[in-house]
Image (cartoon, helix red, strand yellow):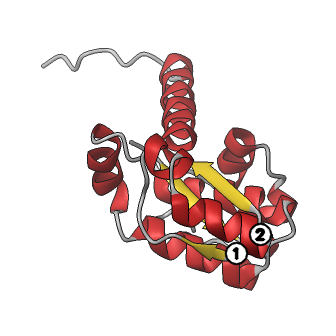
Amino acid sequence: MKNLTFLEVAEITGIPEGTLRPWEMWGYIGTSAPDERGEVFTPMDVLRAAIVRTLRSRRHDKTVCDSVWRVISHYNFQGLRAAFAKDRRFIVLVGKVPIPVLMKDEDVFDNPVVDLVTAEGGYEVLCLDIQTALGRIVSAIEKLEAEQRATEPATEPATS
């Protein structure tokens, strides 16, 4: 899977490039695969940008964004896929604190601890569906790659 530029990440996530660049400067997001084109994003970097967008839209600060990302980055790309295969797809944020594992549906919706904390403490619970988010990102990257292949000039086989 190809690495992406700022412009391609903006196209995939709907986050303006003018927002992505300050987010990188302020440490909300990072690029992990510099190449000859400059700083580029991996699919995991794009996932982080999408998560930051969701959290920032709910007025969470950098500390919360970083703590959620620490939980997700613990898995890495292949680890996330393995967790998804076991139906673990949600990061749950209770107030400003993420539960430090990917959770199944039943872990979230039939969880007495989550129920108690929300009822007694009045904390908001936010479920981030990481599997769906990463699936959409991967599909968008694959579509972008296919479009780029379709516009590349055909090369003729070398003759000797």
x and y percentages locating residue 67 in the rendered image: 58, 79
Question: Within 10 angstroms of label 2, few (less than 14), some, or many (20 or more) residues?
Answer: some
Q: Camera-side residue: 150 or 106?
A: 106
Residue at the image position 66 percent from the left and 45 percent from the top: 8
Q: Camera-side residue: 10 or 79?
A: 79
Q: Which mark is residue 58?
A: none
Viewed as shown, does residue 13 lie left or right of 153? Answer: right
Residue at the image position 63 percent from the left and 52 percent from the top: 127
x and y percentages locating residue 9 in the rendered image: 66, 49
Viewed as shown, does residue 127 lie left or right of 101? Answer: right
Q: Camera-side residue: 26 or 63?
A: 63
Q: Residue 121: which quarter of the image?
A: bottom right
Q: Residue 73: which quarter of the image?
A: bottom left
Q: Secondary structure at mark 1?
A: helix
Query: Residue type at mark 2?
Result: Arg
Task: Identify residue for label 1.
Answer: 24
x and y percentages locating residue 22 in the rendered image: 81, 74
Task: Identify residue for label 2.
Answer: 21
Viewed as shown, does residue 75 lie left or right of 91? Answer: left
Q: Residue 27: which quarter of the image?
A: bottom right
Residue at the image position 75 percent from the left and 83 percent from the top: 26
The answer to whether residue 140 of the structure is visible from this angle is yes
Q: Secondary structure at mark 2?
A: helix
Question: Within 10 angstroms of label 1, few (less than 14), some, or many (20 or more) residues?
Answer: few
Query: Residue type at mark 1?
Result: Glu
The answer to whether residue 45 of the structure is visible from this angle is no
Location of the C terminus by quadrant is top left
Q: Are marks 1 and 2 in contact (CB under 8 Å)?
A: yes
Location of the N terminus by quadrant is top left
